[in-house]
Structures are given as C-alpha cells and as structure tokens.
Image (tube, rainbow, N blue to C red):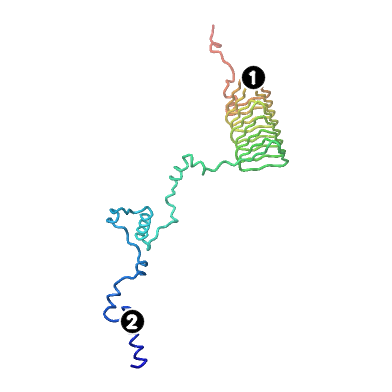
C-alpha cells in the first residue's frame, strides 16, 4: 500500500470516529454537546416547577409584563405622545383649585421703591407700585399705588392708598383712594370713591361717594354724588352734590304761598 492510500485510510478512520460520516451522522447531530447546553435560553418556569419550591421573582414577572406589552403594541399605529387633549380647561381649573395649584398661579408684579431710595424722574409701570422712599417726578401706574414715603409730582393709577405719606401734586385714581390720618395731599384729588382721614388742600372731585372721617381736614371745594361727614371733620370750601348739579333750583319752589292768604274775612 502506497503513501497516498495510507493517508486516505487514516483520514476515513478519523472522520468516522467523530461521527461525521456514515449512518452515525444523523444520530449524533440530534445529541447536544456541552456547548449547546450553554447556548440554550432558559425556559419559562412552569407551574410544576413552582410547586417544587421555585417561585417566579418580581423581576421575572416585570420582564414578562414588558414583553407582553411590547408584543401587544400596534406598531403600525403608534401612540401619539404629543397629544395634549387630556389637559383641558376644566382639568387645569381643578388643578388650580388645590394648594398645589397655587404654585402655578402667576403672582402680581410689584415695583418697590425702598425707604433708602430717591428717584428724580418720571416713573411708568404696568404693575403695582409701592413707594417707601422719595420720588420727584410723575408716577403713572396701570394698577394700584401704595404711597408710604414722599412724592412730588402727579400720580395716576387705578387705586391708591396713602399711609404716613406726603404728596405734592394732583392725584387721579380710576377707582378708590384711601388717605389715613398721618398723610397730607397738597393738590387736587379725582376718584370714584374716597375715604379721607388726613389732610387735603385742593379741590376734590368724586364720582360716587366720599367719606370724611373725624381727623379729616379739607381746604377746597368738594364735588361728589354722595358725602358722609363724621363728627370732628373740618371743611373749608363748598360742597356740591350731583343732585343739585342736575336739578338746580327746580328742587325749590319760587315762593312760599299761604293757602288762606286770599280768603275773605
């Protein structure tokens, strides 16, 4: 036997022992090697395994739920995560009604002039303003003005409150004006309602009602619809009400006629 025949014979024997040739190929292909046992994925625990002491862990259960939800997802029609129709006006209002909703409410803006601040120039703001310091100039406020310091200039606002303050200028308020007993106004006052317990030197024009409290001192004419004067208030000037402006002398008869004056004795 030559070298070539010996090599072929040895190769056939080697392949035959590995189970790759002959009738044993199909049988050995069905058996699993050690490598196959490592590559196989563990199967899901069965009820029988659970009865033998092995229970399903929370992690396994969560993984199973995720797998089921992913499997049930309709990927042809994915959910619209940009849909905000759930946040309707009613739900937003209900959220605002609680204490937690207060965090979402926008607080009113406030402009504050501190006590140690002095401003020379006009001020114009769309927010509320509190003046604790000194301002020399016109103050034009869209909302309310609280005056605690000194203002030399006109004041235009929606509502104003003067406490321990001094103003030299005219005050125009669309709503109400409150002046306490420690405040002084040297100028005209125009408002819809006024409650005065301090000192005012100037004419007062009130569209609705004015209240003069015991410490009130007014040196000027008052034009109003209704007036209330407390005991102790002092006024130097004329007081005109809307009734007299509209009706004038028609409220009074031209003369006093005695009923029996022309009766013969």
Disc tally is 2
Q: Earlier in the sequence, mark 2 or mark 1?
A: 2
Say which quarter of the image contains residue 254.
top right
Q: Are marks 2 and 1 in contact (CB under 8 Å)?
A: no
Using the image, determine if residue 43 lies above or below residue 146: below
Using the image, determine if residue 245 lies above or below residue 18: above
Which residue is situated farthest in the front direction here?
1
Mark 2 or 1, closer to the camera: 2
Please name the residue that numbered disc 2 is placed on.
15
Judged left or right of residue 25, residue 88 is right
Front-most of residues 105 and 202: 105
Residue 145 image offset from top left, x and y in percent: 63, 36
Quadrant that contains the N terminus? bottom left
Secondary structure under badge 2? helix
> Quick one: label 1, few (<14), some, or many (20+) residues within 10 Å?
few
Residue 264 image offset from top left, x and y in percent: 54, 8
Judged left or right of residue 67, residue 178 is right
Residue drawn where x is 59% and y is 42% of the image: 109
Residue 257 image offset from top left, x and y in percent: 56, 15
Q: CA distance from mark 2 to mark 1?
A: 128 Å
Please name the residue that numbered disc 1 is placed on.
232
Front-most of residues 241 and 20: 20
Which residue is situated farthest in the top direction here?
265
Front-most of residues 107 and 198: 107
């Amino acid at each position: 036997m030559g070298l070539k025949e010996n090599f072929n014979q040895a190769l056939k024997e080697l392949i035959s022992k590995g189970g790759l040739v002959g009738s044993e190929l199909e049988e050995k292909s069905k058996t699993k090697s050690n490598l196959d046992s490592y590559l196989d994925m563990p199967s899901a625990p069965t009820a029988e395994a659970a009865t033998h002491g092995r229970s399903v862990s929370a992690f396994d259960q969560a993984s199973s739920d995720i797998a089921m939800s992913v499997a049930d997802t309709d990927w042809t029609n994915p959910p619209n995560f940009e849909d905000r129709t759930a946040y309707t006006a009613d739900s937003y209002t209900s959220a605002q009604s609680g204490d937690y909703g207060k965090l979402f409410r926008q607080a009113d803006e406030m402009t504050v002039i501190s006590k140690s601040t002095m401003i020379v120039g006009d001020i114009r703001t769309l927010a509320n303003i509190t003046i604790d310091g000194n301002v020399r100039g016109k103050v034009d406020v869209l909302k309310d003005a609280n005056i605690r310091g000194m203002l030399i200039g006109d004041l235009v606002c929606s509502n104003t409150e003067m406490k321990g303050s001094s103003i030299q200028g005219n005050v125009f308020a669309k709503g109400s004006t409150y002046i306490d007993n420690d405040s002084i106004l040297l100028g005209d006052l125009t408002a819809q309602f006024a409650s005065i317990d301090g000192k005012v030197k100037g004419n007062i024009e009130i569209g609705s009602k004015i209240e003069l409290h015991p410490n009130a001192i007014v040196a000027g004419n008052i034009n109003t619809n209704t007036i209330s004067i407390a005991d102790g208030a002092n006024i130097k000037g004329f007081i005109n009400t809307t009734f007299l402006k509209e009706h004038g002398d028609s409220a009074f008869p031209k003369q006093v006629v005695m009923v029996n004056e022309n009766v013969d004795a």
